Amino acid sequence: MSECMLNLLTKKSVNPDNTGNIYIEGDNIDALRILLNTHKNKIRVIYIDPPYNTGKRFIYKDFHKDWHDMILARLELAQQLLSDDGIIFISIDENEVHKLKEICNKIFGKENFITTFIWEKTQHFGRQKLNSYSNAEYIICYAKKLYNKKTKELLVERISDSLLDAPLYNASNNITTVTFPKGTVKFNIKDGIYKKTNSKLYELTTPVKVLNGFNSDSFSLRFRSRWSAENVIKEIKKGTTFWIKTEAFAVRAVYGNNKFTKIAPKQIIFTNQKNGQCTYSRFGERVTTTETATSELSKIMDSALFDYPKPLSLISYLLSLIFDEKSNNFSKDFTVLDFFSGSGTTAHACMHLNSLDGGKRQFILVQRPDIIDEKNKSSNNKYKTLCDIGEERIKKAGKIISNNFPKVDTGFRVYEIKKT
């Protein structure tokens, strides 16, 4: 039985002696098996955009069954590469999202499912298909180990100290009873004794006496709180107080001096900038669409080359969410693996984020060197394989970044997989 090894292609590499980035030309199942020797339990983030099962012939000739066998075998290896605090993001369309989740439940465990992000992929609507128009794709997200005595905080969109107050009500949470100790709630209503609210969302389970604008005794309120009763007490010890503006008793948290709140990413990633809920990264960059991705790639490569690339902003946004509970801050020094690397957007995103926050993220990309059809006019006969495209995109993007941020590692070692 033959074994596989990596052979360094020095001429294709960029600054190979001083880089931590890797690009592997070859079948990703072979690459994953090789990486198990060096990177088992060491990969913090995996992002993949696998070929979708749309009925077309697959390029993976070592599998003769179906799409599920193909993705299953690769995810089983990928799971072993993830670190204990690792995260995997998988882009998928509606045809296979449910099957993919079943596969991931089996490999990663139901208990490690985080969410299914819904990315609004287009704002440009052409001919409608019968009964519906697909303007969204999905990104399934799992952790290697989501629980360790308590749920780990692995994804954070931003840390904010600009919000003076924030509502405690969360419609998706269960109804709970929260007790507020004496003097912890400020009221903008008249002094007096209140036995009920004028809102169906909040129920006073004990009367409260408001004196000089504060509660003169403890009282309990029943509603769908985003904090448990225990967390309310913990927040009070941190300096948080509470504010009730009207007799609806819609209580809000007022953070103490030098306090901050961590804002989690929303499940729906909106891209229309006219939408007030449009998604922005903590760097102020808006997540964009497939059309933007095509335009980005065309500017860098002088031609389109790919039909449905993912935008740089989307992958950058996902990688920017990675949070480290130990340091209580965003992670900026970790390895990202993409074993369906296509045009190399994941590598570009790593370098881009490092230029924004001085991080030391490194990438490992894997791509089969499939021959580009010479009849494909979009290739302009410049590139012979898909790897040629990905490598050139990384080189050109890296050059642009290094011109402005020379300390960012924009090099990468190129390897080919050899059978021994």
Image: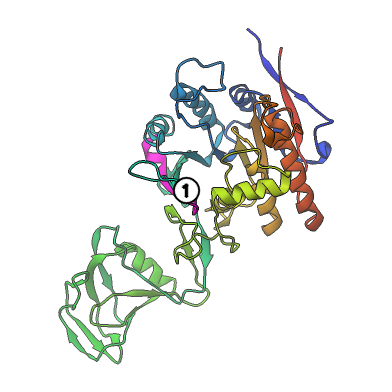
Q: Is residue 359 above or below residue 197?
A: above
Q: Is residue 41 left or right of residue 304?
A: left
Residue that numbered label 1 is attached to: 126
Please state the horizontal and vertical placement of residue 226, each as a whole percent of the image: 33, 62
Element marked by disc 1:
loop
> Residue 139: where, in percent of width, then height?
47, 43
Question: Looking at this view, is 134 or 92 the one in front?
Answer: 134
From the top left corner, tell me how far across and down residue 179 is, in percent. 26, 70
Depth check: 10 or 370 in front?
370
Note whether 179 is above or below 394 in the view shown: below
Magenta highlight on residue 115: yes
How many callouts does the rendering have? Answer: 1
Q: Amino acid at mark 1?
A: Gly
Q: Is residue 236 above or below residue 414?
A: below
Visible residue check, residue 63: yes
- Answer with left or right where residue 301 lies relative to residue 194: right
Would you call the spot at circle 1 few (<14 residues within 10 Å), some (14-19), or many (20 or more)? few
Q: How does the figure colour the protein chain or chains?
A: rainbow
